[in-house]
Amino acid sequence: MKTIDPVTLAVLKGRLEQVADEMDATLYRSAFNPIIAEARDACHGLYHATTGATLVQGTQGLPIFVGAMAFAVKAVIDKVAREGGLQEGDTFLFNDPYDGGTHLNDFRLVRPLFRKGVLFCWLASVGHWLDIGGNVPGNFNARATESFQEGVRIPPVKLLRAGVLDDDIVAILSANSRVPQSNWGDLNGQLNALDLGARRLGALLDEYGEETIAAAFSAFSAGAEAMMRANIAALPDGIWSFEDHLDNDGIDDAPLTIALDLTISGSEMTLDFSRSSPPCKGPLNIAYSTAVACCYVALKHVFTEVPANAGCLAPIRFVIPETTLLGVKAPKPVGGYTETILRVIGVLFGALGRVAPERAMAAPFGTINALSLSGARREGGRFVMFSFFGGGLGGNPESDGLNHANNPISTATIPPVEILEASYPVMFTQWALRPDSAGPGRHRGGVGAIYEVEALAEGETDVFLLGERGKFAPFGVDGGGPAALNRFSWQTEGGEAQPPLVSKVADVRIRKGQRVRLETPGGGGYGDPFSRDPERVARDVRQGLVSREAARDSYGVAVAADGTLDAAATQRLRQEIAA
Amino acid sequence: MTTASASMVGVDVGGTFTDLFFFDERTGRFRTGKVPSNRGNEAAGFLDGLRSVCTLTDLGAVVHGTTVGTNALLERKGARVGIITTSGFRDVLEMRRRDRRHTWGLWGDFEPVVPRDFRIDVEERTLADGTIRQPVDVEAVRQAAQALLAQGAEALAIIFINAYANPANERAAFEAARSVWPNDYVVASSQILSEIREFERSSTAALNAYLQPVVGSYLGKLDAALKQERFAGSFHIVQSNGGVMSTQTARHLPVRTALSGPAAGVIAAAAICKAAGYDNIITGDLGGTSFDVSLVAGGVPALAAQTTIDFGLVIRTPMIEISTIGAGGGSIASVDSAGMLQVGPESAGSVPGPVCYSQGNERPTLTDANVVLGRINAERPIGGKLARLDVEKARAAIEAHVGRPLGLDAMSAAEAIVRIANARMAGAIRLVSIERGHDPQIFTAVPFGGGGALHVGALIRDVGLKSALVPRFPGVTSALGCVIADIRHDQVQTVNLDLAGFDVAELDRRMAEAGREARAVVEQAGLSVSRIDVVYELDMHYVGQTHTIAVPLPMTLGPEGTGLTREGVRSAFESAYQKAFSRLLPGIAVKIVSLRTAAIGRRPAFDLGVMAPDETASLETARQGSRPVWFDGGWHHTAVYARLDLPVGAEIAGPAILEQPDATTVVDPGLSARVDAFGNIIVERKP
């Protein structure tokens, strides 16, 4: 193996990341559906020719995909090993969640890059398509008990053979979606991104040569591994455990446990999830690759400086048995995977909070709240408004949690109300911060949100929701308190209804003029709330983010009706509670 | 057209220095000036500068590039603003687009410029199609305004949902609020930006209100000082779009000054290069902490639709597209725990500055590397504040922090720092050129500001640019830009029309109306112009997409309207889409989202030849001897020249160093430099 000088290495790091970043940007700009274009639910990178390991990743790619893509490329490598016949210009397409995927909406395109007739590496693109059949528009079917009810599953197939598009595959995809045009637009966007990546990488290979670029790939991986090992070695050796729960699986109203035993030994870390619940009936299961990917996301949020490539997972050992809901096989439903991976990430934050609170953070709001409103348009045709909603991040050693943020698994922005109202027959009646939703702490959690939407469509509007945190609130760390629970309700003829399975809703219809209301959790608190600066608590009260009652009960801070701090009463309150 | 302004001064007030460029249109005389900026009392520094280059009583016009707005935003020193908004939407400004600061890492929070207790909602609602679902309760608006006043608000923004589709409720609320508000600082969001997307419009309107009192009082002070000096001419401000506006417009739309100074620099660079025969350029302004890049293709600077000043602070208004990376002279070089050499984004700034300044920083910077390599003259630092630079200290810091961890000696480590910085600058240039589909081989790099000319050679080689052009006075490029910039006014209106079925006559009528409005603003600015162009652009997409592409229309404003046709719009869209994504999507419906209108008052041509070196210049007088400079792994005996004394037509083979008071140009081995008829230095590969 050729060695590479440190200066060329640093130059190539920037150049190669730029290739992946540019692929991301191309898809964002040309995609059809807002989940890619606005929410950036997509990712691109370069992958190892024989192992599929991540070599280089865009800096903006959706975090959860960054961890999962290597498994997707490996799935294609295995297929080629079985069947042969790989040609320059081939491009594979698939969405199989059990074979390196996440859920059915995430369509992966994987293309080999050849140099002088030899496979040099793989390029891949993944993006979330709006709808791929199944019982529920948008595919977040909270009641699915088999993958077949969630949508159409496509194993790795050749969409392009030596550069020629297979129209038959496109026809099959088209026939199996409620929004074929949107999927066609996104598919073209992903092809744009792969074309561009191949051109850019080709030019870079012309400039530096295959050997130098390959040496750079190895060096990136070795560097990331060294950095991760140094981070782990700095933590004390030992075993720490942490558990959290999901409300239910959408079928049976029984909680599911995600349990982690985290072992640190020298520069290595073991993440053992064996004590977690067995596979469930409903769609809250995840496949092994998804579980690894979300652990990667959690670690990257804590050890932010470690570069995004395969090297950073080298010192981590995973124990994720098939007998748990975190390592299932087909056809166990996995459409609600977002909720489960958020809980896995939270559990890792919680365990690390016990190991080293100065590096950790309290739980983020922890649910994507996939809400779909659908019905008939006045001018004919169907509409499906599908979006994910925000909440608060956890308090942390540096600051309060961020108000109304996206989830750790994504960098998604939320579509503007005005775009949603211009596109669908709905009217938002509230889009606001939710008072008393943040976990109290020396640094409180970020505040969650209230979204209220009125149906304007003439006929009935179908409501589906896949959410969580209806029973188990986002936890605090290092003495911080929990945030508020997630809450969903809708108007009926007689008043207001709430889902029997708390945050999961299917087969609910509202009429024109009726509203649905979603109140999302904030983040957990960090540190003892009784040590929070009373002036800051009083300010939160004046801002309407914390009520006077909560200031008194959760923080031991007395705030007068006009919002000013009552310092003497505060001192008394805090002494009483300390005593 | 308005009368000639006779003589004018461009004034660019930066953080450290105020640069001036005086020009007399009658005699063709010019003068440059540089005085220290007077932070906190800008008017004093401003007047000192003006007096140093001209007599104020005879002066026709002052055109000003300012950072007062930018600084107020970055330092969060704007006014106390109140917001009145639609019931249920009080928190749009604070909820942002539900983003976070970094992809990786979840720490950090966000304070909006208007705190929650200064945001009040009132009953009113407009739907997306413009229907008024609920008329605004004007009495509630008056009460809200009074409550905000009582709390201490100095400026007011009225921001209603869907006001882009029908501004009637916002206008009614605006009138009601004005009736009780004690000053002029009241805006309605649709007056600032009549475009879909409530957060971007809210942020732009709120930041406009936030800046109004600050910029208003700043301009008021300058106005008063100018009057006291019996200045009888007109006073203008450069906007972020590179066009000039009246101070009256600037007081109303201060948010449009956010990139005032840098935009003027790009305008000047474009004009200098056009005169010199270069239409395709990439400007690079290397400062203490950042490198700002802009692209000018075919003589026209690229415009961006919006910018993010800081996390959560979005301004949406057309502006010269300036891409910034955190690599400047003060950027710190370090080796991370994976053994990777990094330069920036952490910076030592100008205080304490590089190690060689001996002001307390011990970690090596890009400037330290340039000093150690002999590229910067340690005995004559730029700016004149320091007597000399400490080369030994810089060398020791580079050896300790970069050399040892990488196993390199001090000189190789210094060269490595410069190479990494060059690579980052090259990356920024690729981002605006290759990534936008431009071929770098036809582009010329134009460094301005103090440091850029040190790195032009690397940019030519790393990116494959055609050449570099160093303007004769790189330090006053922005001030020159103030003098030559066109007058410009932009407007936007979201229209949401289907291409297949829209009423052509109706859109044509709206375009003509918008064109006439924009033209009137330019006519009222009071600077001489040779003509006024009205240009149109549509934001369009395929139905279902949320992003749009900018579609320039070939139509312009005539006496009979604009000559708009459906087919004309379709073909303009298809050619723009094809260019952007290289594939069309036949069969999918196309939508016109927004109409953008700009009126541009073209300024009379400015003869840049006046700046050329005079006939007394000669190669002999310019020659300053030589010094050893480190290139490509070894010391090279390198000739040094006083750049301003070089005659037209002089040719100098690299390696060479060309020095002038505010910049140093490095001509690398293998490159050569020549002086063109305007006194610019052109650096190219040796033939």
Image (cartoon, rainbow, N blue to C red):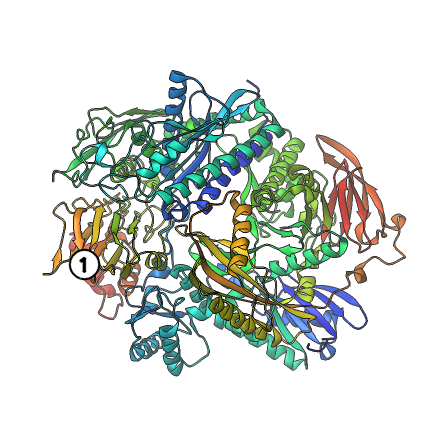
Relative image position of residue B270 (x, y in whole percent): 68, 56
Foreground: B546 or B363?
Answer: B546
Please tell me which residue lies in front, B311 or B633: B311
- From the viewer's perspective, is residue A154 above or below residue B288? above
Q: Amino acid at mark 1?
A: Arg
Q: Can I make out residue B501 in this image?
A: yes
State whether residue B118 is above or below residue A53. Answer: below
User: What SS does tag 1 mark?
Assistant: loop
Q: On the picture, is B470 further left or further right than A54?
A: right
Q: Which image quarter: residue B176?
A: bottom left
Q: Residues within 10 Å of mark 1 (few under 14, many from 20)?
A: some
Task: Please tell me which residue is depicted at 81% across the width and 71% down the height of the picture.
Answer: B27
Determine the image quadrant of residue A359.
top left
**Horizontal side, residue B107 vs residue A566: left or right:** right
How many numbered circles does the render carry?
1
Q: Which quadrant of the figure contains the C terminus of chain B?
A: top right
The x, y position of residue B393, in whole percent, is: 64, 40
Q: Which quadrant holds the N terminus of chain B?
A: bottom right
- Residue at the extreme left: A494
Residue A367 location (% of width, % of height): 26, 45
Describe residue A209's horizontal placement relative to residue B480 as left or right.
left
- Comparing A289 with A445, the one in front is A289
Determine the residue positioned at 73% across, 30% down. B634
- Residue plotted at (31% across, 48% down): A393
Q: Chain of mark 1?
A: A
> Does B662 appear above or below B53?
above
Q: Who's the residue at 38% across and 21% down the image?
A: A79
Q: Position of residue B189 (x, y in %)?
A: 42, 68
Left or right, A543 with reference to B451: left
Of the pair B488 and A553, the residue shown nearer to us = B488
Residue under label 1: A511
Camera sees residue B391: no
